[in-house]
Image: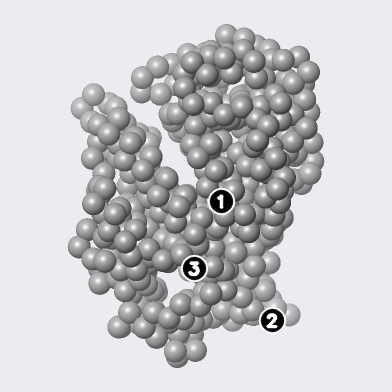
Amino acid sequence: MEIEILGAAREVGRSAISIRDGKTNIIMDYGVKLQEIEDVPELTNGAGKKDAQPRPPMPAKRVSAVFLSHAHLDHCGALPILYKKESPPLYATAPSLELANMMLKDSMKIAKKEKYKLAFGKKEVEKMNKGAKSIDYNQPVKIGDFTCTLFDAGHIPGSAGIFLKHRSGLTIFYTGDINTAQTLLLKPCMLPNKANVLIIDSTYAMKDHPDREQEKNKFLTEVNLSAKTADTCIIPVFALGRPQEVLLMLEKHTGLISIDGMAKEASEIILKHKKYIKDPKRLSRILENIAWIYSDEEREIAIKQFPIIITTAGMMTGGPVLFYLRNIKSRPETKVLFTGYLIKNTPAKKLIETGTFSNEKESYKVLSARHQFDFSAHAGRSGLMHIIKTLRPKHVISVHGENCQEFAKDIMTEFSRENSAISQIKAYAPKAGEVIRI
């Protein structure tokens, strides 16, 4: 068996895994990564501007089938590239397929606006959808000598870990992005009983998250103050999962909330697939009682009438959040509340660190108070170690993290103790394109 890491090797982003047995090639995820000047200097043009063109994984050929873990762009953003010359079936949960199409459509819209060319177009997206098949959790699919099954990953609605069982008896579990903790929106992940090989999300391999209830109370304290004084509070979010979780936290303030950007469409899709979230009736009730923003005119009204504004994009790289920020930047009584990890070199990260918003088009000082909270949908280090102990694998492959090599060493150390039930474990942190033979 060959396992090739096509992306997310020692980095967060562009996830892609190839599993081959000589006859069959299964691809799990095919995502992108947006590059920043500081990360990849050669991606700047002569004028010194960032080239925002997404970076895809390494090429894949002779693909038998594709399985998608979930609809974040770093896992689905390059999927149509696989359909330029081939037509493999694509398997994912129903919400993941619909949400992935929403994200790909937005990617093409941004590429057109920013005047760069994607490696795919509408033709490839249509071809991808023609062969797409929605499957539910615990619904096995036969691909060559593999039987493939999805397990609820607890990350965003419809997210899945992918379990492969080969005719030879070898079992492989790819977590995708996974969460072992329960949230207001989702139940914790479900796991198979055992796996010989574990390919594990390592985003938070080196740290645990703060107590979620305490973090929620700190967040609510800030929002409550804004609600009481009617001062604007902007909450930048990714469209999938986070805005819906935040809305559940803010249920008592529904009449004071407006929601803008792709979070609107994502919420509508999520509610279409009710069984993939914990309390669809509660979320539906909240969504019926908040203001939905669709235009610049409505944004002008929202910033005067609604103290709580939930809006994309979470990293402030674009989207309606920039409209709101420009309008409150000179008002120290306003707030910007970030609800999760901020990627290095993004405008959001620079804002929280320096108090200055800057991108390639503008730069200005922001007097608003700024706070960052941790409502991550990824398992922390303890959760990842729990997954390893539960599955008792002989091989662990660390991917999708900035400290994969260090984590692999820690796994070897942790499970080399004499009293460990899986003391013979071997851990890897492969480079992109590296093949592991099992």
Give the label, 1 or 2, closer to the camera: 1
Which residue is under mark 3? Answer: 135
Identify residue type, mark 3: Ile
Position of 82 with respect to 66 (left or right) is left
> What residue is shown at x 53% (from left), y 36% (from top)?
264
Vertical relation: 432 (above or below) 230? below
Identify residue type, mark 2: Ala
Q: Position of residue 319 (x, y in %)?
A: 45, 29
Identify residue type, mark 1: Lys
> What residue is shown at x 30% (from left), y 53% (from top)?
125
Whether residue 217 is visible here, answered yes or no, is yes
SS under mark 1: helix
SS under mark 3: loop
Position of 21 with respect to 395 (left or right) is left
Point out the tag, 1 or 3, that comes first from the N-terminus: 3
Distance of mark 1 from mark 3, alpha carbons?
A: 16 Å
Which residue is under mark 2? Answer: 421
Distance of mark 1 from mark 2, alpha carbons?
A: 43 Å
Which residue is under mark 1? Answer: 272
Q: Position of residue 207 (x, y in %)?
A: 65, 51
In which quadrant of the rendered image does the C terminus lie? bottom left
Q: Determine the image quadrant of residue 178.
A: bottom right
Q: Residues within 10 Å of mark 3 (few under 14, many from 20)?
A: some
Q: Position of residue 118 (x, y in %)?
A: 26, 44
Point out the tag, 1 or 2, that comes first from the N-terminus: 1
Whether residue 199 is visible here, answered yes or no, is no
Point out the tag, 3 or 2, that comes first from the N-terminus: 3
Give the label, 1 or 3, closer to the camera: 1
> What residue is shown at x 77% (from left), y 25% (from top)?
224
